[in-house]
Amino acid sequence: MTDLVLSETRDRIAILTLNRPDKLNALNYALIDRLLSLLDLIETDDGVRAVILTGAGERAFSAGADIREFSSSVAEGTDAVLSDFVMRGQRLTARLEAFRKPVIAAVNGLAFGGGCEITEAVPLAIASDRALFAKPEIKLAMPPTFGGTQRLPRLAGRKRALELLLTGDAFSPARALELGLVNKVVPHAQLMPAAFDLARRITVHSRAAVAGILTAVARGINQSIAEGLLVEAEQFARMAPTADLREGLDAWMERRQPAYDGSRAHRPRDAVRQTGRVGTSP
Ligand code: COA
C-alpha cells in the first residue's frame, strides 16, 4: 500500500511529503491520521530538530480536503461529518500550529482549501514561484473547516481575508507573501534548499529556546497582550534553570560560539555552587 505521507530525516531535519500526487495530494482521513501519527513520533525524537512539509509530484502541495470522502460523511449526517472530517482537520492544523519543533511548509504547487489552511497554521512557510493559493470552499457552498475562517483574518486582516474567502479566487505566491501567509517566495528549484537553509538557521540554536518561542507565540497570539505576556514569562521561567540558557549567556560573555546540549534538565544546584557555571557541552 502506498505510504500517504513519506518521511525521511536529513541532517536532523524531517521531511514529510504528502503523497497522493494523482489526487493533487488531497487530504483524505487516512493521510491526515498518518501525518498526525508522524508528528507524534517526531515530537519525541531527539534526532529531529525541525520539520519540512511538502507535497509529492509536479503540481500540488495539497488541493485540500478529499471532497469525495467528506461528501460521504456529509451524507451520513452532521455528527458524522463533524467528528470524521471537521474535528480531524482542525486537530491537524492545531497540532501544526502548536508544534514544539519548527515546521516549515515548502509550498511546491497548488495550496487550495486545506492545503492553504495548513500553510496558514504552520509557523513558517516558503513558496515556490509555481505555487498557487485559494480558499475555494465557497464554490462548494461551505465555509472552510480546518481553521480557514480564523487564521487567515488574523494573519492578513479581516477585509483582505474575507475577499479571498467570499470569492474563492486563486491568488499568487507574491500575494501570499504580501498577506503574510508565507515568509518568502523562491524559484521552484530553490524551494527545498531554501527550506533547509531556514531550518538550519533555526536548529543551530538551543532547541529548548526554540520550543519556548514557538509555544509562546502559538499560545499567546490569540490571547490578550496581558495574557500573552504571562505565557512569555512562563516560557522564560521554564528556560531559566536550564543548562542551555547558562551556556548561551556564558558563551556571549566569553566571546565564543555556544555549544548546547539541548537539555531541559535543571542545573544541579551543587554544580552551580562549586563551579559557578555548568552546562557547557563537551
Ligand atoms: N478532493 C478529492 N480529489 C481531488 C481534489 C480534492 N480536493 N482535488 C483534486 N482531486 C483529484 C481529482 O478528482 C482528480 O482525480 P481523478 O482524475 O481521479 O478524478 C485529480 O485530483 C486531478 O484533479 P483535476 O480536478 O482533474 O485537476 P484540474 O487541473 O482539472 O483542477 C483543481 C485542479 C485544483 C482546480 C481542482 O482539482 C479542484 O477544484 N480541486 C478541489 C479544490 C477544493 O475545492 N479544495 C477544497 C476542498 S474543501
Image (tube, rainbow, N blue to C red):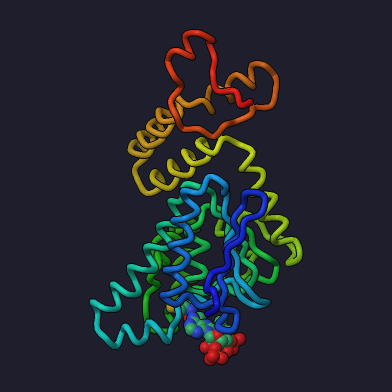
User: Left of 35 or right of it: where is 22?
Assistant: right
Q: Nearer the viewer, residue 34 or 127?
A: 34
Q: Nearer the viewer, residue 204 or 82?
A: 204
Q: Residue 140 in the image: x percent, y percent? A: 41, 84
Can see residue 263?
Answer: yes
Can see residue 178?
Answer: no
Question: Residue at position x 53%, y 44% from top?
Answer: 46
Q: Residue 31 in the image: x percent, y percent? A: 47, 72
Based on the displayed image, in which of its 4 quarters is residue 247 positioned? top right
Count of labels in the image: 0
User: Left of 138 or right of it: where is 108?
Assistant: right
Q: Residue 255 in the image: x percent, y percent? A: 70, 19
Question: Residue at position x 47%, y 46% from top?
Answer: 100
Question: Residue at position x 69%, y 60% from top?
Answer: 192
- Which image quarter holds the C terminus? top right
Q: Is residue 137 above or below residue 243?
A: below
Q: Residue 167 in the image: x percent, y percent? A: 48, 77
Question: Residue at position x 58%, y 21% from top?
Answer: 249
Q: Nearer the viewer, residue 134 or 48?
A: 48
Based on the displayed image, in which of its 4 quarters is residue 110 positioned? bottom right
Q: Is residue 254 above or below residue 57?
A: above
